[in-house]
């Protein structure tokens, strides 16, 4: 049953502790260790029960505990110091203000269908969202004037495995009133709203904002009284529904996003489309120039291109949205009329050399993204090369090596992904504030001895082992096992054994089951006492990807073997919390996609920050960063037309590395 109305309820904290709400509402706490330590100190039990969610935790703190903290001068002083640190962070000049003094740049608008800032705000699915969240955090640290634009999904995707290892999907409701979000007010004091046309139907969205350090994230929410049920569902779930539902979401993201920026008072002069999902932002900007400035559509297109950047994130066709001409015409016929062009001219933006006499008008969002952008890039050097080949037909008269698609290799936000152990090591070497500074002075890392680094790795591994045991125990009980049946989980994993991690979305090309290609050989590795190894896997499959679900089932089935279950574990419901624990605690990060289908693959970067060694196919970022001194390459750079042969060759190469 759907709730009639939601009311935010906040804990009644003493006046002297009200500053805790300010700290909880700014997502800088997700990467500021002092803020996290403060909340944990207030009530360690509530911190764990809230799953490390400050806002939820403040509602769990007992009146007695809150009063004791308010009367604790040392705690109040610590809270004020953390609050002062946040205030300085928000107001003092950062790298951008110190180094870019002659720029007229006002705001960069960064559009993405998902943002992974924290597991406490589950509006992300995978790598694209985590990257977008890291971009917001890094822009904040650097002082770059950036605003994020996305959708507030009212349901999140949670994974639970049944007794046979099959993925089951749950979609719990997201209540924005329990998240670190603020409903933006309009001039009349009511919620600030925008609207878009969806094939002749008015769809309204109210605007929320999240503060990510110095950076604002604007989110559109269609679950409002003005909408009929179909329109309320536009922002129900991420990457869900049929083709038209996806199109409606992308119209709201692109066209609605531009309107949301205006309504919220942002005068953006650079627009970044994170993948083709947000590409309609360019069309809305052209429409405004045609109607407001009297430009022709062609003139508006050139003006928009000069201030638009497009980043493609996938070399996999399934990752690109393609819509039928009939569907596009239904939603954009009026738009074309407003811009004084035919629907055919509009559809040309997303078409590539249609066959002679073809009456269809399939519309490719990535193709439109390239045509509406003045600059375009892939997310690693290899991905840039692959993208130039894939999309060469967009520029039919240009040699492939001159196709105007560059590359900017993805990165990660270091303070978010660094574990406490490596943070201590770096704190002892680098200048104060290094974690949020644009000038880190990383050369001093050479002073860290092997012994110190190994000590850090051992502590992180022990923390991971405790996490694996607790998580595995909980998930087995949730599947129906009794407490006596899960007693063995208390001895799962060895804190002194070499530990491998594999965690990512389960798609066919990522080959999550490559390690199972020779199970007898794998069992010998796992049962070795001379050179003990252990593996932890985690990840979700798209709800409609039966092949991905089958890979998970196979891994879980293998992990149920009593002969190896102490050394081979699959953790369900992969999210940012699981990712942090794995990236920080394993010794070796395993990645074995089919080259060259991994566009970048930043999980290995997060692991490397924590002193973890990568063992990976030469794909994505690893292809350009690998040297024998810092990790292992699985196989070489050969290309294969026979995928089964490729899998066989590279499985053998992986086993050779593990055994030798």
Image: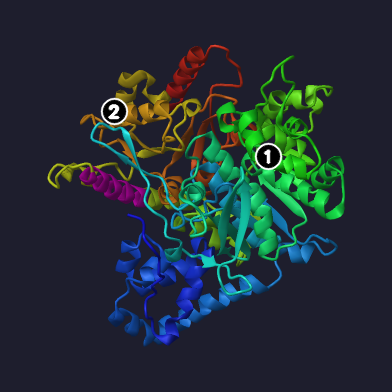
Residue 421 is situated, as x and y percent measured from the top left of the image, at 45, 56
Residue 274 is situated, as x and y percent measured from the top left of the image, at 64, 44
Q: How is the image coloured?
A: rainbow
Q: Is residue 37 left or right of residue 303?
A: left
Residue 18 is situated, as x and y percent measured from the top left of the image, at 45, 81
Q: Residues within 10 Å of mark 2 (few under 14, many from 20)?
A: many
Q: Is residue 510 above or below residue 461?
A: above
Query: Can you identify the residue that label 2 sits on?
Result: 558
Q: Secondary structure at mark 2?
A: helix
Q: Name the disc covering residue 332, or none.
A: 1
Q: Nearer the viewer, residue 81 or 317?
A: 317
Identify the residue at horizontal 60%, vertical 17% (top origin): 639
Q: Outermost residue toward the front? A: 200
Q: Outermost residue toward the left? A: 484
Q: Nearer the viewer, residue 450 or 549?
A: 549
Q: Is residue 637 magenta?
A: no
The part of the chain drawn in magenta is: 462-478
Main secondary-structure element of the magenta-colored stretch: helix
């Amino acid at each position: 049953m759907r709730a009639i109305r939601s009311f935010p309820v906040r804990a009644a904290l003493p006046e002297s502790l009200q500053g805790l709400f300010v700290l909880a509402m700014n997502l800088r706490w997700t990467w500021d260790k002092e803020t996290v330590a403060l909340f944990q100190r207030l009530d360690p039990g509530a911190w764990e029960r809230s799953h490390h969610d400050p806002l939820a935790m403040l509602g769990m703190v007992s009146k007695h505990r809150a009063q004791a903290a308010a009367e604790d001068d040392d705690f109040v002083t610590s809270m004020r110091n953390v609050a002062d640190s946040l205030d300085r962070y928000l107001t003092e000049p950062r790298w951008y203000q110190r180094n870019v003094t002659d720029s007229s740049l006002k705001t960069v608008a960064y559009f993405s269908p998902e943002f992974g800032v924290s597991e406490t705000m589950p509006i992300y699915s995978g790598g694209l969202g985590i990257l977008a969240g890291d971009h917001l955090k890094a822009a904040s640290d650097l002082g770059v004037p950036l605003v994020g634009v996305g959708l507030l999904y009212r349901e999140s995707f949670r994974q639970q495995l049944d007794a046979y290892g099959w993925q089951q999907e749950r979609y719990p409701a997201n209540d924005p009133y329990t998240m670190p979000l603020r409903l933006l007010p309009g001039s009349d004091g009511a919620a600030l709203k925008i609207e878009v046309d969806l094939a002749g139907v008015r769809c309204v969205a109210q605007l929320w904002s999240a503060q990510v350090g110095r950076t604002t994230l604007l989110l559109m929410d269609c679950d409002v009284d003005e909408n009929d049920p179909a329109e309320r569902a536009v922002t129900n779930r991420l990457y869900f529904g049929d083709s038209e539902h996806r199109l409606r979401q992308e119209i709201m993201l692109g066209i609605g996003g531009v309107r949301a920026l205006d309504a919220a008072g942002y005068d953006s002069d650079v627009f970044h489309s994170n993948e083709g999902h947000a590409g309609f932002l360019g069309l809305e900007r052209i429409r405004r120039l045609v109607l407001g400035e009297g430009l022709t559509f062609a003139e508006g297109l050139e003006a928009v291109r000069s201030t638009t950047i497009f980043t493609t994130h996938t070399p996999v066709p399934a990752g690109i949205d393609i819509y039928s001409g009939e569907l596009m015409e239904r939603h954009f016929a009026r738009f074309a009329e407003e811009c004084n062009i035919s629907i055919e001219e509009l559809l040309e933006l997303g078409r590539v050399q249609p066959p002679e006499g073809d009456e269809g008008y399939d519309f490719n969002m990535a193709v439109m993204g390239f045509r509406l952008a003045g600059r375009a890039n892939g997310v690693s050097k290899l991905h840039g090369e692959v993208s130039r080949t894939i999309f060469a037909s967009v520029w039919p008269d240009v040699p492939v090596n001159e196709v105007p698609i560059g590359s900017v290799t993805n990165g990660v936000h270091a303070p978010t992904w660094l574990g406490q152990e490596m943070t201590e090591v770096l704190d002892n070497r680098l200048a104060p504030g290094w974690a949020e500074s644009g000038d880190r002075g990383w050369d001093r890392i050479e002073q860290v001895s092997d012994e110190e680094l190994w000590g850090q790795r051992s502590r992180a591994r022990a923390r991971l082992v405790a996490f694996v045991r607790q998580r595995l125990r909980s998930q087995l009980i949730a599947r129906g096992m009794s407490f006596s049946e899960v007693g063995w989980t208390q001895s799962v994993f060895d804190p002194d054994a070499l530990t491998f991690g594999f965690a990512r979305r389960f798609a066919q090309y990522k080959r999550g089951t490559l390690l199972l290609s020779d199970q007898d050989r794998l069992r010998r590795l796992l049962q070795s006492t001379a050179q003990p190894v252990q593996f932890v896997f985690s990840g979700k499959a798209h709800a409609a990807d039966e092949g991905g679900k089958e890979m998970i089932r196979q891994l879980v089935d293998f992990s149920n073997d009593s002969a190896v279950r102490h050394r081979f574990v699959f953790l369900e419901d992969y999210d940012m919390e699981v990712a942090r624990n794995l990236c920080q605690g394993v010794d070796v990060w395993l990645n074995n996609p089919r080259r060259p289908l991994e566009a970048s693959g930043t999980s290995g970067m997060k692991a490397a920050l924590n002193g973890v060694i990568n063992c990976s196919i030469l794909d994505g970022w690893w292809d350009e960063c690998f040297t024998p001194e810092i990790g292992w390459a699985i196989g070489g750079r050969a290309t294969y037309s026979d995928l089964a042969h490729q899998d066989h060759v590279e499985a053998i190469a992986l086993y050779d590395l593990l055994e030798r």
